[in-house]
Amino acid sequence: MAVRAVRGATQVEADDREQILEATTELVSEVMSRNGLSTDDVISVVFTTTPDLTAEFPALAARKLGFHDVPLLCASEIAVPGALPRVIRLMAHIETGRPRADVQHVYLRGATALRLDIAQ
């Protein structure tokens, strides 16, 4: 087994608690599904949001999905002028037998614009 990092991002329409939780749930679920992961495979997850999102911690959505024993951290992105607004990002550290090239990074909703080379 190797330790790998999986990236992902999504975008919400507004700084709204329910939208943040819904979008984060979708993002985490897709990362887990596309990479064939269970919570036992996840070492830790770092969530970030753009500075315009403050209504809820994205980590709460992961906790509701069963990430009870996984260390989770939330942070704010730097405020870069012209950056895509209302974005939730994650970087999950996982144990997997997959080669690095086979790890599926997940970019959803408006965040597909962040990585057009790998967005699904």
Image (cartoon, helix red, strand yellow):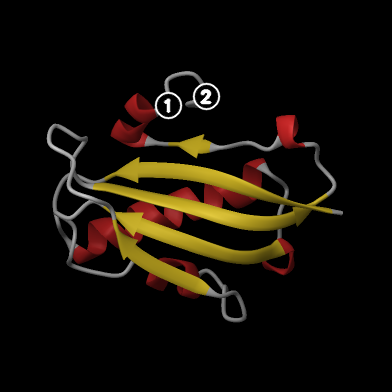
In this picture, residue 79 sits left or right of residue 28: left
Tell which of 34 and 102 is nearer to you.
102
In the displayed structure, 65 sits above or below 115; it is below
Instruction: Name which quarter of the figure residue 71 lies in.
Output: bottom right
The amino acid beneath tag 2 is Ile
The amino acid beneath tag 1 is Arg
Dot 1 falls on a residue whose secondary structure is loop
**Residue under the image location 18 percent in, 65 percent down:** 54
In this picture, residue 18 sits left or right of residue 34: left
Tell which of 51 and 18 is nearer to you.
51
Location of residue 53 in the rendering, given as x and y in whole percent from the top left corner: 18, 58
In the displayed structure, 12 sits above or below 53; it is above
For label 2, the residue is: 118
Residue farthest toward the top in the current orientation of the protein: 117
**Residue under the image location 63 percent in, 57 percent down:** 93
Crowdedness of circle 1 by 10 Å Cα count: few (<14), some, many (20+)?
some
Report the quarter where the N terminus lies. bottom right
Dot 2 falls on a residue whose secondary structure is loop
**Residue under the image location 57 percent in, 74 percent down:** 66
Location of residue 96 in the rendering, given as x and y in whole percent from the top left corner: 79, 51
Location of residue 76 in the rendering, given as x and y in whole percent from the top left corner: 27, 60
In this picture, residue 20 sits left or right of residue 14: right
For label 1, the residue is: 115
The reply to whether dot 1 and dot 2 touch (C-beta < 8 Å) is yes
